[in-house]
Image (tube, rainbow, N blue to C red):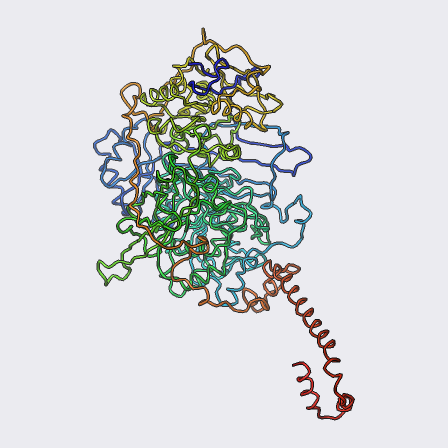
Amino acid sequence: MKPFSSMTMKFANSWLVLFVILLCGKKHFGTRGGNSSHEAHICPGCSRLTLKVEFTSTVVEHEYIVAFNGYFTAKARSKFISSALKNSDIENWRIVPRNNPASDYPSDFEVIQINEKQKDGVLTLQDHPNIKRVTPQKKVFRSLKYSESDPMLPCNETRWAQKWQSSRPLRRASLSLGSGFWHATGRHSSRRLLRAIPRQVAQTLQADVLWQMGYTGAGVRVAVFDTGLSEKHPHFKNVKERTNWTNERTLDDGLGHGTFVAGVIASMRECQGFAPNAELHIFRVFTNNQVSYTSWFLDAFNYAILKKIDVLNLSIGGPDFMDHPFVDKVWELTANNVIMVSAIGNDGPLYGTLNNPADQMDVIGVGGIDFEDNIARFSSRGMTTWELPGGYGRVKPDIVTYGSGVRGSGMKGGCRSLSGTSVASPVVAGAVTLLVSTVQKREMVNPASMKQALIASARRLPGVNMFEQGHGKLDLLRAYQILNSYKPQASLSPSYIDLTECPYMWPYCSQPIYYGGMPTIVNVTILNGMGVTGRIVDKPDWQPYLPQNGDNIEVAFSYSPVLWPWSGYLAISISVAKKAASWEGIAQGHVMITVSSPAENESKNGAEQTSTVKLPIKVKIIPTPPRSKRVLWDQYHNLRYPPGYFPRDNLRMKNDPLDWNGDHIHTNFRDMYQHLRSMGYFVEVLGSPFTCFDASQYGTLLMVDSEEEYFPEEITKLRRDVDNGLSLIVFSDWYNTSVMRKVKFYDENTRQWWMPDTGGANIPALNDLLSVWNMAFSDGLYEGDFTMASHEMNYASGCSIAKFPEDGIVIAQTFKDQDCFWLLDSLLQYTSYGVMPPSLSHSESRQRPPSGAGSALPERMEGNHLHRYSKVLEAHLGDPKPRSLPACPHLSWAKPQPLNETAPSNLWKHQKLLSIDLDKVALPSFRQNRPQVRPLSPGESGAWDIPGGIMPGRYNQDVGQTIPVFAFLGAMVVLAFFVVQINKAKSRPKRRKPRVKRPQLMQQVHPPKTPSVVQEGDAVGA
């Protein structure tokens, strides 16, 4: 075994490559306490951008949230808690009073206070049959994120000034962005955007067409969960109720964010909202210091259910989709027919940055675009990461709309501009509120049917993939047409699978499939508009099209046993049949799925509604690539937040220290995947242990920032695979117990201070894996700039090599962050073809490999809790021990039902909601007159009203886009007229030449009656 050696170059031999960089001449660094702040000073040639983020999350001392299995009176809840604690040693406890509008109603939770030292009482509480869960009371501090509109990428010269308090970051943060929030106008770097005319988002989306039809949101109850609203704000006339769920004695908005959001939804003046006559229910859940508690949200959610809220806007979010009390309550809200609209997040352009609850299937998740229909840079991207590592994420956001430079109500009056997905969210919430008011049969409207209408009517943006735009841009009028011809049914998101359609179907379209490859998994969301609960009847059917070679692919399914609330999943695994191992071409088929729900009519006991949906599938198949071109990405051994505390690979990211983007080739490693594909490599994902893949099919196994432990069977199998020709590339990261202790946080589940469960990678576990080849990493922590082979790079946080074989190649250098893919190319050139690049073999920075003598290798940190989240470890008395090796996943391929018919040519246009005919719902002629939102009251000034529904000096965007078309058509008509006249003039002399009575025509012009002239003219023109 000669790892990374230049002595033997035959590919037939076994190779192992360990990629590590020794960073020399730089200082170790740690962290220090203080508040979080981040200032980026951009170089002069860049668009100016100042970003400051401050947020923390702590728990309330000694307070716990006790969740029950149902709704009970205060007396019953107290009785349950007393009964649960009766046999414990806890005597000093009390129920914390909650003085809010929900206090008079039954509730499903209670807040209690228990002495910190009596931790066993928490476990005792959970043993009670009526108590579902006990979690700590959480206090969150939210700070708005501000920057100027259309932020640009910073240049290389960035100076950091940072302080950090090592506490758990906020789970639910405001998703607003834009310094325009505090200023009436913003500054733009582009001359074209320096227009003094503000954008009226409601008119841009043609809400005034529905106003003209008499729909203004009347009778719809819409809730705004935010910072409150002033009582006598001049923009609102139908504020039905303002409630305060905080510990401050005020209902007013001291920040302006809640006012802005409410204005986008229902403002009547200046910056008009979508539904000015809707019933506004204002829930003040954040204090003026931007502090909230979990119990405040839970109480407010319960009250929203009691008040039968129709639409709820939530412009907050966070990465923790395993925050059980919050997630469970969102499910309960939608199950009670509350249509929840939520911002998808402001963590773009990185992929895998979706925020909860917008990433839930039952919630309408909204992304942001600018007024030029470009995806806003700040808008978070998919996929969802709930399903990793074994599965694949769902498509989110659901829809996008304007979220950059939108005008909304100021705190005391007037208008202000704001950017962020917290702006896009109320745009959709306002549109949804308006749409609900247009439906005559309100029982047809539910969270599923509304989402179906929005995504079926959305306008797809060109050149943008589905993980950025979802189903496309909000189209209010088409959604109105669909809703008003809607019949309850099931539908799918996405509605078809086309692995050949780029860029919309990225990443599926970026790599063809082939025999022997890992199955391609597509996670489809089932929307059930027939009822809150449902099921899939029997099993989905796979029907390949024989004329389109559908029998060359195999399909397997897994799906939700119960569709609740309003939705479920259908995971489709697609693979190539053995007979197509050397075949190239397009294969098509479709999946048929029948969804059933209980009938709404109670008189029909046992009756069910059913809906059958077709899911077309189209794939491109190629012959199996050579082993040297196939790279396998290890996803199984990557861990991320939630549920555990896994820190960022880059320790400089102090304001967001959690590693929560999935570590997947289609999320935060997307650029690397794109580069490997451009170089001709085929990259597959391993979501199971090393014992579950055939190493003879792959040239290289790629391991990046692995945090998981390894089964003993995996270590044995990998050593055998390397001996048989598999190459291994390991990108390590930092692991230092001193630093890990400094980045501790207060764990909210155990109410203890916890350290990270690993560093950026689990170096002790990697050392165990590599020990047979005499390789090991150290616990040194380094950073610095590096120049190698004319490439400048930056290595932010990494360790050094402690031990390496004598005949290997070790490069001792430092890095700088611009282009590191050339180094990966060099390593793959060696692992795939056995060719050592000169940039490595003849590098001036090459040094003798360290023997490891006299240096202690890093050990696992004492007291870590990795076993709680590990798939490999389980708790034992003393040290955690490996679990039993799980069985490898085995797919049950569906029995095909071949069809001898031709597949549809355009899958996108072919797929529509059933029973929808847009022609049946006519829209009025709205181009000429756009009325005011409401008439003036006696004695009221009309200065704030917008004549014709359009801002002075600003034409409607859609009308403006049609003006050139009409101008062109008009010019063509005029041109045609002149051509006809010229032809007439040329032909007239030829026809008149033989006639001798032509002078009489001139004489007939003067008499009063000239019928002969008209007849003659008709004859001439004939």
Q: What residue is shown at x 51% (from left), y 54% (from top)?
A: 459
Reply above or below: 464 against 515: below
Reply above or below: 23 against 563: above
Q: Position of residue 397 (x, y in %)?
A: 46, 46
Specify whether residue 226 is in view: yes
Q: Position of residue 824 (x, y in %)?
A: 52, 26
Dividing the picture into quadrants, the one containing residue 925 is: bottom right
Q: Nearer the viewer, residue 491 or 122?
A: 491
Looking at the figure, which quarter contains the N terminus?
top left
Q: Nearer the viewer, residue 626 or 165?
A: 626
Q: Position of residue 330 (x, y in %)?
A: 37, 46
Left or right: 92 in relation to 409: left
Q: Nearer the viewer, residue 452 or 42?
A: 452
Q: What residue is shown at x 54% (from left), y 41% (from top)?
A: 378
Dividing the picture into quadrants, the one containing residue 109 is: top left
Specify whether residue 322 is in view: no
